[in-house]
Every structure is written in structure tokens, then in C-alpha cells.
């Protein structure tokens, strides 16, 4: 057994862990079970990393306490992170809705974080066996290359994320350690995740797999206007991923197709202009062709547009504007981008991320009960919460 003492031990070399190490002062050790740091960064955004969002604000986050995230987000903003990106010469672009991506590769963000935390030690392929506190400091037993190592540290930072994407090693370790020190863990569930349906509905959606359509999807008083994608398993796409954080088993979704269009007015006008055309072909002017054909067939609306009375067109438009769908489940943590819920914030300082139950224990990023919308918000929470903790640790000296 080898003994080592550090001032600050950070568990997790992901976005939050590396960012915290860059601000936590001297004598910092970061450990991770993976072979390389920042693996979730590397695969994010299709390999381009949606690293923040221009519109980041507290209302873009879900938590039992919606006020908790305000302090950290205000003290380290998206503009602060953009300044950091600019200092490292990383080219970026905005896609839609304020989402910012690297021009080249997500690896640019990892390299930037590695450079920023250059003063910290990094141990990879290292796992945690046990954590305790002896009244003066933390004792953490590690397994590194088959050797057992016991570390002592004044500060312990939990930055291991949540349960999402277990094939990358996600285990919920932060929850276990936080609970060990008396913290409550809220209900956790997959979030920003595709939704699945019963066998009959799945068969229908499979025929439309690969079709994407503009939609407004609403549930529990919240709605998102983005693309909806049909898959062999159910529904995906940005609008579905967003609403998945609000949906619960047994609830229905209200789907409005082409929310920016007045479908009834369009159909009436086209009836006058092109009465001999099939209803499916007219609908295909608003919807993807396969979806238009499915709607006409499945809903039993046959004939040319010129044959349809106002009542039929109104009924069709109303159904397209209020399509009710009831998912049975989600694809689970296997494909979830984040975990909803986590360590309850009631006994965590919103300014420093330090536990009020155990001094020296800091919890940051996805491990906390703060979950952002799709579009770079969760990365911004990682940066903001990590800087709050890192600066607090450095200030302790």
C-alpha cells in the first residue's frame, strides 16, 4: 500500500472536473477510471462539442430548487467561457437557438482544459474503492494499475457526473459518496433521451424511420418548437429530447406539426388553386412526403383536395395541430445525454458548491440536482459550478 497526501482530490476528469482543477490552486490531483480525460466531451455534439449556449439563463435548468443555479451561472457566464475559448484560438460557430460548436473538433475543448489544468496531476485508469473522513481530512482508497493506494486530502470534489451512458463507465458514484456523508439524493431518471412506444405505434413509426419534421411538443405545461425525428424505436430529435425531461410514464404528449403554418388556411387555398391534386400531395407541401402519405392513409382521408369540404379540412388541420401520443418509456440511460436529478441542493452552498454537512466536500456538474436543456446548457453548468468550487478551494489556501 502506498500513501500520498494532496490538498485537493477531484474525482472525475470530465468537463466539470478538469475545469475545477484549473481554478482550485496548487497541489491538485484529478483521477478518472477512463483511459483518456473528457470522453463525454469528445463524443458530444457529433464530435464538435456544443460547449455552451448564448441564451443560458436559470430558466433553462430543472431542479427541485430552481434558484440554486443562479449564483454560479451569474459569476461565470457563457461569455466568460467564450473568452477562454478565444484565448486558446478555438474557432467556433453558432448553429440554431444559441448553440455554439467547435468548427474543428471537440478535442480542441479537451486540449484547452488540459492546458488550463496543467498544474494539476492527472491519474487515469484509476478507480475508487472507499472514501471516508477521519475528522481532519478525507481518506480515499484507490485502485491504480492493480495497486492499492490510500490518499489523504483536505478537499474532495465529486465531479463524476450521473448515470447516463453506462457503457462509458457512468455509475452514479457521486450519489453514493454524497449519501455516505448524509446528503439526500433526489429521484433520478434518464433525460434528453429518445422516447419509445408500444408495439403497434412502434410499427407505424418504423415505417417513417428517418423522417424529420418541425413540431411543437408539449407536456406538463412546457413546450418546445424544434425538429421531431421518427425512429424504429419511437421518437427522437431535439423537440423530443427536450420534452423527455418533463415527461413521466403514463402521460401523453401533445404534438403540433408545422407549428408555424396555418394548415387549414393553406389547405383551403390549395383546394381552389389545385383541386385535382391528391390530398397527400398537397399535404406534402407542408410535411415530409412519407409522413403526408401516412397521415392521409392512417386517418382515412381519401380523395383529391377539391373533394374535401371545409369540415374535413378543419378536422385534418386540428388533428395535425393536436396529435396526442403516449410513450411507454424512454431508451434509458444507454442513450440519455444527462441524468435528471441528483444530489439535492438543500445542503450545498450555491456560491461555493461546498457541502454544509461535511466541510471540504464539494459537488459539481451533473452530479447535482441541476439539469439543463439540450443545447449546451449542461456544459455551461459544468463550467460555472466547477469555477465556483475551484475558486472557493483556492481561496481557502
Image (tube, rainbow, N blue to C red):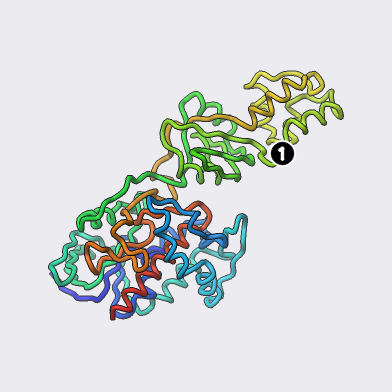
Question: Left of 285 or right of it: where is 295?
Answer: left
Disc 1 designates what residue? 261
Q: Residue furthest right?
A: 273
Mark 1 nearby-residue class (10 Å; few <14, some 14–19, many ≥20): few
Where residue 308 appears, as percent x and y from the top left, is 77, 20
Snapshot quadrant of residue 19? bottom left
Residue 304 sits above or below residue 222 on the image: above
Where residue 194 appears, as percent x and y from the top left, is 48, 41
| Quarter of the N terminus within the rendering | bottom left
Secondary structure under the numbered disc 1 in the rendered image = loop
Residue 37 appearing in the image: no
Residue sitting at x 19%, y 68%:
138
Residue 150 versus residue 324: which sits nearer the camera? 324
Snapshot quadrant of residue 383? bottom left
| Quarter of the C terminus within the rendering | bottom left
Residue 234 versus residue 58: which sits nearer the camera? 58
Residue 330 sits above or below residue 4 on the image: above
Where residue 321 appears, as percent x and y from the top left, is 64, 32
Residue 109 appearing in the image: yes
Question: Left of 285 or right of it: where is 147?
Answer: left
Question: Left of 303 or right of it: where is 235?
Answer: left
Residue sitting at x 23%, y 57%:
177
**Numbered circles on residues, count:** 1
Where residue 20 appears, as percent x and y from the top left, is 37, 70
Question: Left of 68 or right of it: where is 208?
Answer: right
Residue sitting at x 46%, y 42%:
246
Residue sitting at x 32%, y 64%:
349
Amino acid at each position: 500500500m502506498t500513501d500520498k497526501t494532496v490538498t485537493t482530490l477531484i474525482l472525475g476528469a470530465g468537463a466539470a472536473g478538469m475545469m475545477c482543477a484549473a481554478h482550485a490552486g496548487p497541489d491538485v490531483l484529478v483521477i478518472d477510471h477512463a483511459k483518456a480525460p473528457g470522453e463525454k466531451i469528445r463524443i458530444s455534439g457529433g464530435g464538435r462539442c456544443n460547449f455552451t449556449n448564448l441564451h443560458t439563463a436559470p430558466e433553462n435548468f430543472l431542479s427541485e430548487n430552481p434558484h440554486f443555479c443562479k449564483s454560479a451561472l451569474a459569476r461565470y457566464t457563457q461569455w466568460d467561457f467564450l473568452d477562454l475559448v478565444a484565448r486558446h484560438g478555438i474557432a467556433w460557430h453558432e448553429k440554431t437557438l444559441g448553440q455554439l460548436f467547435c468548427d474543428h473538433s471537440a478535442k480542441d475543448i479537451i486540449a484547452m482544459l488540459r492546458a488550463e489544468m496543467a498544474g494539476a496531476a492527472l491519474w487515469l485508469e484509476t478507480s475508487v474503492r472507499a472514501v471516508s473522513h477521519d475528522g481532519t481530512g478525507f481518506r480515499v482508497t484507490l485502485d491504480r494499475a492493480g495497486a492499492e493506494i490510500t490518499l489523504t486530502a483536505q478537499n474532495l470534489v465529486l465531479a463524476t457526473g450521473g448515470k447516463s451512458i453506462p457503457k462509458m463507465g457512468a455509475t452514479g458514484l457521486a450519489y453514493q459518496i454524497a449519501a455516505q456523508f448524509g446528503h439526500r439524493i433526489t429521484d433520478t431518471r434518464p433525460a434528453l433521451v429518445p422516447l419509445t412506444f408500444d408495439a403497434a405505434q412502434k410499427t407505424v413509426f418504423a415505417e417513417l424511420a428517418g423522417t424529420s419534421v418541425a413540431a411543437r411538443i408539449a407536456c406538463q405545461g412546457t413546450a418546445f418548437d424544434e425538429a421531431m425525428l421518427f425512429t424504429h424505436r419511437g421518437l427522437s430529435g431535439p423537440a423530443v429530447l427536450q420534452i423527455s425531461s418533463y415527461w413521466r410514464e403514463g402521460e401523453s404528449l401533445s404534438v403540433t406539426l408545422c407549428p408555424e403554418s396555418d394548415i387549414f388556411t393553406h389547405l383551403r387555398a390549395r383546394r381552389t388553386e389545385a383541386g385535382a391534386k391528391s390530398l397527400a400531395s398537397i399535404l406534402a407541401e407542408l410535411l415530409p412526403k412519407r409522413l403526408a402519405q401516412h397521415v392521409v392513409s392512417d386517418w382515412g382521408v381519401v380523395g383529391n383536395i377539391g373533394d374535401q369540404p371545409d369540415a374535413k379540412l378543419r378536422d385534418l388541420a386540428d388533428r395535425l395541430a393536436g396529435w396526442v401520443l403516449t410513450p411507454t418509456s424512454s431508451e434509458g440511460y444507454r442513450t440519455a445525454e444527462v441524468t435528471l436529478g441528483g444530489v439535492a441542493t438543500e445542503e450545498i452552498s450555491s456560491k461555493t458548491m461546498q457541502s454544509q454537512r461535511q466541510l471540504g466536500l464539494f459537488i459539481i456538474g451533473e452530479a447535482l440536482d441541476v439539469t439543463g436543456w439540450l443545447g449546451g446548457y449542461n456544459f455551461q453548468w459544468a463550467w460555472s459550478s466547477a469555477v465556483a468550487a475551484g475558486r472557493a478551494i483556492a481561496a481557502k489556501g
